[in-house]
Amino acid sequence: MSPAEPRYPQIRVRTRSRNPLALVAAIREELRRAQVGEEEIRRFSRQALAGSEPARIREVCRSWAVIDGLDRPSAL
């Protein structure tokens, strides 16, 4: 896995909300749909929610899944 490639590149997420917590929830849902184990989902959640800065949360989310449209101005 390269530094730019997420842990789960087959998981793609898009959300219209600017709230980083909505992004975390969307990734958790997609991890469940991909039948990723609960411990791994908890690991993602702990990492994503460890900081309160939106940029840090988005960075963690990018390291776990492909986030469509995240870098566009109208996206997160």
Image (cartoon, grey):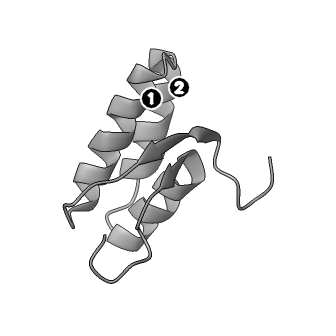
Q: Residue 14: horizontal and vertical position, in percent?
A: 34, 53
Query: The C terminus lies in which quarter of the figure?
Result: bottom left
In the rendered view, tell whether residue 73 sits above or below residue 15. below
Residue nearest the observer in this picture, 10 or 2: 10
- The extreme bottom residue here reads 73
Say the numbered circle drawn on residue 40: 2
Cβ atoms under marks 1 and 2 closer than 8 Å: yes
What crowding class fits label 2: few (fewer than 14 Cα within 10 Å), some (14-19), or many (20 or more)? few
Q: Secondary structure at mark 2?
A: helix
Q: Earlier in the sequence, mark 1 or mark 2?
A: 1
Residue nearest the observer in this picture, 38 or 73: 73
Q: Residue at x 51, y 20 (%)?
A: 36
Q: Residue at x 26, y 78 (%)?
A: 74
- The extreme right residue here reads 2
Q: Nearer the viewer, mark 1 or mark 2?
A: 1
* Residue 71 picture quarter: bottom left
Report the amino acid beneath label 1: Leu
Q: Secondary structure at mark 1?
A: helix
Q: Residue at x 33, y 83 (%)?
A: 73
In the rendered view, tell whether residue 22 sits above or below residue 28. below
Q: Residue 65: horizontal and vertical position, in percent?
A: 53, 46
Say the numbered circle drawn on residue 31: 1
Left or right: 53, with 65 as reference point: left
